[in-house]
Image (tube, rainbow, N blue to C red):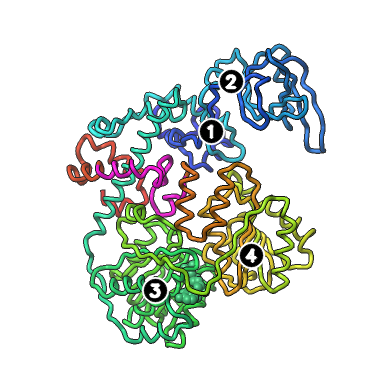
């Protein structure tokens, strides 16, 4: 190995097939591989004996093969292999499924070390589908330690991945170069990079693992913070923007809405109007839970710009959302003489040309659309305000691109992702923040119930009843992180079961991630128009889609979802005047799962849920920085590591105060890392 930038395909054992699988995990170079950290660890240091085993636990054992392997066909596609084994305290069986090669692996009297799940019924002790190594193997030594477990993809085994990492560390470890300045290392008591990387993959002790983690979290947050500070510095210049006028017509418009704005909406609107009226550029984020009424606030702002003889644009992440917004805006503003157009990927070419021309000569007041609105061929006559909805799907770059279409137009972004305020300040250093923290009145709270699987039939009966009363329903299928294919397949299976056994006489639709996006959009439209009663779907149901007639959301295997995600899904119902229900079918048994389901039953407040979830879940990403157009965090967690983050902030500010462009020799490594991490935002950082 000559360089960590070397592509993975040159590694021993990586052929075209494995290369593809690695690519799916965004692993292209050796360095990517090294920076793919374990998801968790399995402590295999304590070894048990057959007699001390407990049903259901995962354990490690030293065993001796004491008989011949048996093959049994259970079903057409299921073959089971059992191997008799023993230790000094008793006998057991190793059980393997559909692995014909296993017949050739073991010889009587072989001494082995295994790790697997224990199953005990009556007098038989079984270890299901264990990992194994032979005592004479040298790999065995490593196997009996704290084992890393990686988040992988279908077709790539832990064993293969482990071997790859091992290979790198025994051949390329010397290529790992420290890039943090000496003084930062010393002052914060950070270990060296090679020690950290070695121990994050192959911890030699729990303590060394902690030390390694700390260093890697620190480095990751430092890069993030430096990048954010540099971006912020650029936007902090108080750029001159448009000073919109207060227009009396705007209040007339608000007065004639079919509802009164909530206090919270009023407050946020005030903040927005103040920004718009000042000559400083508006850069504001509006946060509000699903259903809090962000759209109408956006529309009022759009209208204000129009009244001032400016054009405005409203960008949504999907066609269906764009269409939905277009319909709402059109209905409200057309009677007032405002010309709104929808610009999406699906309109015909001729139509599009006409619309583009009208935008350019200023005949159009408001443009609503998907990312089609930031294409180069869209030229505005006089753009004064740009709004993006559900902004987490748009990166910072898109925001900037949109803003470049006008002469410093005001910018407003809307999101339903609940982010605690302190964190938002760090993430959106360049944005002011408004929060709509109140739901419109009269909204019936969604009733949430968690049930276990043997109540499925009753749940379906309940769904039937609601449909018979004229409502619509969603059934969301289990989330299968590792494989979109399996997820799609299991959704199809559930769909078939439901249409055959429970909902034969109803109109059922099927929606999953393997469908073409046009197909998906179409189906959502059909559901929205009421031509489908029940939608069986993966999580691809759009955030923000408004189907007020839908009153039931059933979520299968709810234990597999994050609470924030469950909350977003639940927000698909309860958008009309009907009492709505969310039913969580839970297969999980452990206390934390039950606790999480209780939180869902007990609260409908996205912020409360987010914080409690975090407290329970611990590590793992609650929401990805990716959503915010920032480099992905691989090990740091912005909630959990807030203390380290504060420490890092101090350090980052000091670094930039001393060396704003990172030109000093000692900061060269930092600079390189920063440029790599912020590739997409390079222009903004201005390094
Ligand atoms: P979100 O914040 O999730 O985008 P929407 O803007 O889609 O929420 O609003 C949800 C629903 O609530 C819409 O049907 C909207 O017309 C309605 N709504 C918004 N504000 C109010 C209000 N102040 N009073 C009553 N209904 C409102
Ligand atoms: Mg919305």
Badge 4 vs badge 3, beta-carbon distance below 8 Å: no
> Which residue occupies 73% across, 32% down?
97
Q: Position of residue 291 (x, y in %)?
A: 50, 68
Which segment is the magenta one? 621-650
User: Along the line of sight, which residue is nearer the eye, 634 or 255?
Assistant: 255
Quick check: 198 above or below 459?
A: above
Residue identified by numbered label 4:
552
Q: Position of residue 169 (x, y in %)?
A: 44, 25
Residue farthest to the left, as pictured: 658
Secondary structure under tag 3 reads helix
Counting residues from the start of the chain, the first of labels 4 and 2 encountered is: 2
**Left or right placement of residue 490 versus residue 21 in this view:** right
What separation in Å lies between label 1 and label 2 (alpha carbons)?
19 Å
543 falls in the magenta region: no
Q: Position of residue 117 (x, y in %)?
A: 65, 30
Quick check: 395 above or below 22?
A: below
Q: Nearer the viewer, mark 3 or mark 1?
A: 3
What separation in Å lies between label 2 and label 3 (alpha carbons)?
62 Å
- Tell me, for residue 149, which label it has, or none: 1
Secondary structure under tag 4 reads strand
Counting residues from the start of the chain, the first of labels 4 and 1 encountered is: 1
Badge 1 vs badge 2, beta-carbon distance below 8 Å: no
What separation in Å lies between label 4 and label 3 (alpha carbons)?
29 Å
Q: Quadrant of the N terminus?
A: top left
What separation in Å lies between label 3 and label 1 (alpha carbons)?
49 Å
Disc 2 C-beta below 8 A from ligand 1? no
Q: Is residue 11 visible?
A: yes
Counting residues from the start of the chain, the first of labels 1 and 2 encountered is: 2
Badge 4 density bin: few <14, some 14–19, many ≥20, Cα 10 Å: many
Residue identified by numbered label 3:
263
Residue identified by numbered label 2:
47
> Which residue occupies 53% across, 59% down?
568
């Amino acid at each position: 190995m000559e360089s960590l930038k070397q592509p993975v395909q040159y590694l021993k054992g990586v052929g075209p097939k494995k290369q593809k699988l690695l690519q799916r995990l965004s692993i292209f170079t050796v360095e990517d591989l090294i920076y793919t950290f374990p998801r968790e660890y399995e402590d295999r240091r304590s070894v048990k004996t057959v007699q001390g085993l407990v049903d259901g636990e995962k354990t490690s054992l030293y065993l001796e093969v004491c008989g011949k392997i048996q093959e049994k066909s259970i079903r057409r596609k299921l073959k089971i292999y059992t191997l008799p084994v023993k230790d000094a305290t008793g006998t057991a069986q190793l059980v393997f499924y559909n692995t014909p090669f296993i017949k050739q692996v073991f010889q009587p009297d072989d001494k082995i070390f295994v790790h697997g799940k224990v199953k005990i019924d009556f007098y038989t002790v079984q270890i299901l589908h264990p990992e194994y190594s032979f005592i004479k193997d040298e790999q065995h030594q490593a196997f009996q330690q704290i084992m890393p477990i990686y988040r992988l993809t279908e077709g790539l085994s832990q064993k293969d991945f482990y071997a790859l990492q091992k290979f790198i560390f025994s051949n390329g470890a010397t290529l790992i170069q420290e890039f943090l300045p000496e003084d930062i290392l010393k002052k914060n008591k950070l270990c060296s990079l090679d020690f950290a990387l070695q121990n994050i993959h192959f911890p030699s002790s729990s303590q060394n693992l902690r030390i390694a983690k700390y260093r890697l979290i620190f480095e990751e947050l430092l890069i993030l913070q430096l990048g954010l500070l540099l971006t912020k510095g650029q936007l902090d210049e108080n750029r001159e923007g448009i000073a919109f006028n207060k227009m009396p017509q705007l209040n007339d418009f608000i007065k004639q809405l079919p509802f009164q704005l909530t206090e919270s909406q009023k407050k946020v609107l005030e903040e927005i109007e103040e920004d718009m009226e000042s000559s400083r550029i508006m850069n504001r984020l509006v946060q509000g839970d699903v259903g809090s009424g962000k759209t109408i606030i956006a529309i009022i702002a759009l209208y204000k710009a129009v009244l001032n003889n400016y054009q405005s644009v409203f960008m949504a992440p999907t066609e269906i959302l764009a269409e939905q917004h277009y319909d709402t805006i059109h209905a409200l503003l057309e009677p007032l003489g405002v010309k709104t157009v929808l610009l999406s990927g699906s309109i015909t070419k001729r139509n599009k040309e006409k619309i583009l021309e009208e935008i350019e000569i200023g005949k159009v007041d408001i443009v609503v659309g998907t990312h089609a609105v930031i294409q180069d061929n869209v030229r505005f006559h006089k753009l004064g305000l740009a709004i993006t909805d559900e902004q987490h799907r748009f990166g910072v770059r898109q925001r900037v691109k949109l803003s470049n279409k006008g002469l410093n137009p005001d910018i407003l972004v809307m999101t339903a992702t609940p982010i605690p305020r302190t964190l938002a300040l760090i993430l959106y250093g360049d944005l002011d923040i408004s929060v709509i923290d109140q739901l419109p009145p009269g909204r019936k709270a969604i009733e949430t119930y968690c049930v276990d699987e043997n109540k499925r039939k009753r749940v379906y009966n309940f769904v039937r009843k609601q449909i018979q009363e004229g409502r619509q329903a969603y059934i969301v299928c289990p989330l299968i992180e590792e494989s979109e294919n399996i997820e799609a397949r299991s959704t199809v299976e559930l769909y078939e079961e439901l249409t055959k056994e429970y909902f034969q006489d109803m109109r059922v639709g099927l929606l999953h991630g393997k469908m073409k996006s046009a197909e998906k959009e179409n189906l959502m439209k059909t559901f929205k128009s009421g031509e489908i009663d029940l939608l069986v779907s993966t999580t691809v149901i759009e955030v923000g889609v408004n189907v007020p007639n839908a009153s039931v959301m059933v979520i299968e295997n709810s234990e597999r979802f994050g609470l924030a995600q469950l909350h977003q899904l639940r927000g698909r119902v309860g958008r009309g005047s009907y009492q709505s229900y969310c039913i969580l079918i839970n297969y999980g048994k452990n206390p934390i799962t039950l606790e999480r389901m209780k939180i869902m039953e007990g609260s409908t407040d996205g912020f409360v849920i987010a914080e409690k979830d975090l407290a329970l879940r611990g590590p793992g990403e609650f929401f990805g920085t990716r959503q915010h157009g920032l480099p992905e965090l691989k090990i740091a967690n912005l909630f959990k590591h807030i203390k380290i983050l504060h420490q890092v902030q101090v350090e980052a500010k000091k670094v930039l105060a001393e060396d704003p462009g990172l030109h000093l020799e000692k900061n060269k490594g930092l600079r390189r890392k920063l440029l790599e991490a912020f590739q997409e935002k390079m222009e903004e950082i201005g390094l």
